[in-house]
Image: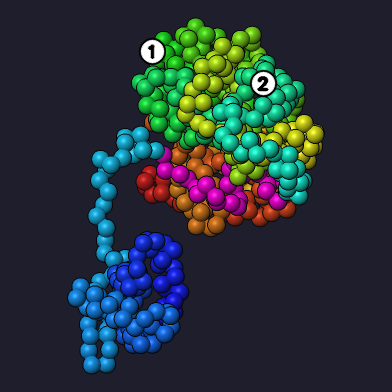
Amino acid sequence: MDYALLLSTFGKDHGHPGWPRQRLLHECLRHAIRTGTLAAGTRLVATRALAAELGVARNTVLYAYEQLASEGFVVPDRRGTVVADIAPERSRKPAPVPQAGLSRRAQNLRHLANRPDAGGAFIPGLPDLQAFPLALWRRLLDRAWRGIAPQQLNYSDAAGEPALREAIADHLRASRGVVCEARQVFVTDGSQSSLDLCARACADEGDTVWLENPGYGGALAACRGAGLKIEGIDVDEEGMAPTAQDWQRRKPKLIYTTPSHQYPAGTVLSLARRMALIDGARRCGALIVEDDYDSEFRHDGPPLAAMQGLAPYAPVLYCGTFSKTMFPGLRIGYVVVPPELAPQLATMRAQSSMMGRVADQLALAEFLRSGQYALHLRRMRRLYRERRDALVLALQTHLGSIATVHGASAGMHLSLQLPDTLRDTDIRAAAMAEGIVVNALSMQAVQDGCRWNGLMLGYAQVPAERMDDLVRRLAGVIHLAAYASGGSRRRQKA
């Protein structure tokens, strides 16, 4: 046991500047005994030797040992001092925190299907991090830091750096058909931050929000956190499909949708549905939260314009993120709000969310303005299209007779619809046991009655040459489950 190291570490983590050396040593040894670092039966170093090792007076060590003995932590004997038989704190079961200590919002959060930092096939929503131009990004960051003045180290504009807001507005007007000015753009800490802002700023507790069913768990968490009443709206092959009865009996204050590439099914909201959703929202005084999370990757056909720009003064809050096009650790997203809401949102942000990370925002602004972002997107579109093609071919080859591919025309993931005789949660568990990570569509349900039964496959981070082998292994899991299911039905008929 290195007592000098033990004392130094304890002093940094637990010590008090005003303690004398004898108390510091006593507290250190007591902590080591209570946590099991000094186990029962351990013979402590002789007082004279320990004093020499620590460079302290022998009386300092004598005081610490005597105090420990009086408290029952050590037992003196003829050969020295021995640690008493005391159960260390780490082996004691702590008292459980009562459920009353958590709000209903916290207790009702959906369990995460995968760790946020997980990787591998087929994790959805994860870009190819190896393909990001990291050296260029380092240079942009270095340039941004060199140009920052001392006053810019203070809290910055709560809506985001003006240069970045201008760059985002220019990019969205050119690439997504969004009708906006820089003052309508609010920089956030990513998609979840944007959704939290929309839910809290544009609806009151108890108001009704429509969520796609199945749908994005982050939107569900944001709306539950804001105390909103959740109403799931079924998704079919044309996207979110509210009925006339839904508009009459479940009038929303907010409508959340992922029209360009539905999460998780992958369907695209048809133009007729988009216009009907805008018209319905206008009639009932609702706002639409358009989450355009991976719209930059359109593989088949021309790019689809954002809902926000389809109609004049559309009641749309347009949300986007750089986590999918660049890298998740950047933690920068944005919300484009209708112009009449911008002043109130600016006031709210100023009182609830102080901005910082000036260098990251300035570097991103230059990345956009220099054309490097557009160049990076072109490279990634080619790469992801190649991987999409390899995955679709492999799925058709190995699973074409039993499953149907949906949502392959855009984005970074597609869905694989399974027959109702197979439970997607069982397939997911069996695939996980084989080292293949897939999400079950039914686990993304926001309410009971979800009609989707299948798997969500993210392909952006999986090399094309690995697709066939991975799908072949996944197909083995699915075919085995289908065989077992068929055998079970045959036995029931018999």
Q: Nearer the viewer, residue 208 or 466?
A: 208
* Any part of residue 269 in sight: no
Work out how far the residue at label 2 is from the one at label 1, CA to CA, in angstroms: 38 Å
Q: Nearer the viewer, residue 487 or 185?
A: 185
Specify the quadrant that holds the N terminus.
Answer: bottom left
Based on the displayed image, in which of its 4 quarters is residue 204 positioned? top left
Q: Nearer the viewer, mark 2 or mark 1?
A: 2
* Any part of residue 123 in sight: yes
Q: Which residues are magenta?
A: 110-133
Determine crowd level at label 2: few under 14, some 14-19, many 20+ residues with C-alpha closer than 10 A: some
Residue 110 in picture, x, y percent from top left: 41, 39
- Examine the structure image and report whether residue 446 is included in the region drawn in magenta: no
Q: Which residue is mark 2?
A: 182
Question: Residue at the spot x=43%, y=19% of the render?
Answer: 203
Q: Amino acid at mark 1?
A: Arg
Q: Give the secondary structure at mark 2.
A: helix
From what the image shows, is residue 476 above or below residue 171?
A: below
Residue 316 relative to residue 74: left or right: right
Question: Residue at the spot x=44%, y=68% of the render?
Answer: 9
Q: Earlier in the sequence, mark 2 or mark 1?
A: 2
Q: Which residue is mark 1?
A: 249
Q: Amino acid at mark 2?
A: Ala
Residue 491 in picture, x, y percent from top left: 38, 49
From what the image shows, is residue 144 above or below residue 22?
A: above
